[in-house]
Amino acid sequence: MTVAGMEKLEWLSRFVDQTPGDREVGGKPRQVPGVCWSKVSPTAPPNPKLILWSNEMADKLNLARGNDSVLGGGSVVDGMQPYAQRYGGHQFGNWAHQLGDGRAITLGEVKLPNEVLELQLKGAGTTPYSRFADGKAVLRSSIREFLCSEAMFHLNVPTTRALSLVTTGEMVVRDVMYDGNPAPEIGAVVCRVAPSFIRFGSFQIHTADGNYDTLKQLLEHTVKNHFPQHSVADDNGRINWLTQVAQQTAIMISHWMRVGFVHGVMNTDNMSIHGLTIDYGPYGWLEDYDTNWTPNTTDASRGRYRYGQQPQIGAWNIARLAESIAPLMDDVELLYKVLENYDAKYVESQNLMWSNKLGIEDFSENDESLIVELNEILQEVETDMTIFFRLLSSIASPEITHLSDAFYNPENIPHEKWNIWLNKWWDRVEGEPNRDKMNNANPKYVLRNWMAQLAIDGANQGDYSICEELYELLKNPYSEQPEFEEKWFKKRPEWARHRVGCSMLSCSS
Ligand code: AMP
Ligand code: MG
């Protein structure tokens, strides 16, 4: 296999060729009705430096390490037709109308032997969709996106991926907690990769505009290129396609629940049409198992996007997507089927998830009480989700003392309740839980909030060794990796309990 530079890749521009676009190139932030994209040029950074590199993603693209200039937004190669996508979205339940790629610029699509992948820069300058902001991104949020998207991939959670992180050589001012304390941060650009970055909001905007011709063209483009097994020529085909999107979304969210991931901003503009985790912002990982937790301070009082509500929000978002297709339907009543299919797929995925997490064969409705009770006890005192489930697969007898490392305060463990539950589970699995199944469903290592923060603290001082270490560690989240156990298989340290970036995150990126 030859390894090549960007200019040697086979570039396609299906999205700009097949959907209507803006006549103006670049230009000031503005409303751009009726279109799916605006062509733009990335803004060249003063001093692009490649910092993080996904060798796996690069291998897949057959790309040589380097290309700092292109990956930082400093140049384009022949075949690329950079554009910003136009989309809308419901933000925290309210329709926001036009949003679009305000700090993301697609370079183009790369044709590979078995797939086509879109490469997109995040943080490479303003576009017509930048509204009031600068189109840039800081090192902190770029590290969070790079490390988390790659970690999610290795956790077997559907996700967009990252190829590179380039620092720009420029400082960017951000008011992290929106409290009147702006400070300069190191600027960076991540190159992320996915089959496409089409979102639920990509469809919604045209329906909101009443522009059904564009809606139809976008739908046809999406299905032809990304769901070729479907035809959307009639109601039946449209429902089948929507059902697939709904099912993939349900599967993705059930994986989030499995690993303890909280997206933080499940607005419809942040929902990928492919059922991929997209737009890593103020996400977080459950450390103690609190189903009401959300990392996003903007949402702290309402908790719309809290861990335990993600499946319901998925349904709400699917309803908004289905609604946006309504103008193309002969019989809109059929759209209810899509929601039913979402619910059914979610239940099926959850059952599979619990069967795997608990090593139970032939999981059935009769096992529901076991799950309900487990969820209750897990929340009675502060209990680390990752450590609890990982250790559960290794215990030799149904006694909670084997699991005491999962508790933040060993003095208040509800021993009796736990032993009752453990015995019930032990009987159910006849003393032989399927430990392999459990170890493939319960990761040993996830990107805990404080781990990402340590990587960021190091990077801000010019030391990327923790970033590199975590990137390597999280390539094998289900392996024991005993050399890393003491350092990273660990409950949240006290310093991280109330620290910004660990327990509190904002959309500021
Ligand atoms: P998010 O919910 O973080 O994915 O972003 C919501 C919208 O705000 C999207 O349309 C983004 O493109 C836009 N946005 C966020 N940050 C910036 C920024 N620094 N510059 C321009 N647009 C931004
Ligand atoms: Mg977004």
Image (cartoon, rainbow, N blue to C red):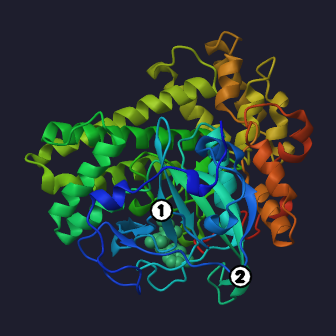
* Nearest the eye: 379 or 261: 261
Helix, strand or loop at disc 2? strand
Q: Which amino acid does label 2 sit on?
A: Glu
Name the outermost residue toward the bottom. 180
Residue 504 in view here: no
Q: Residue 170 carries which label?
A: 2
Residue 282 in view here: yes
As displayed, is residue 128 above or below residue 58? Answer: below
* Alpha carbon distance from label 2 to label 1: 25 Å
Q: Quadrant of the C terminus?
A: bottom right
Number of labels in the image equals 2
When asked about the image quadrant of residue 212, the answer is bottom left
Where residue 493 appears, x then y in whole percent? 84, 56
Q: Callout 1: few (<14), some (14-19), or many (20+) C-alpha neighbours within 10 Å?
A: some
Where residue 48 appears, x then y in whole percent? 71, 72
Where residue 10 appears, x then y in whole percent? 49, 49
* Nearest the eye: 223 or 242: 223
Q: Quadrant of the N terminus?
A: top right
On whether ligand 1 comes within 8 Å of the CB at mark 2, the answer is no
* Nearest the eye: 458 or 103: 103
Q: What residue type is labelled 1?
A: Met
Question: Marks 1 and 2: in contact by CB < 8 Å?
Answer: no
Q: Residue 397 carries which label?
A: none
As displayed, is residue 191 above or below residue 182? Answer: above
Residue name at image x 57 percent, y 67 percent: 122
Disc with the residue nearer the chain's start (2 vs 1)? 1
Q: Mark 1 points at which residue?
A: 80
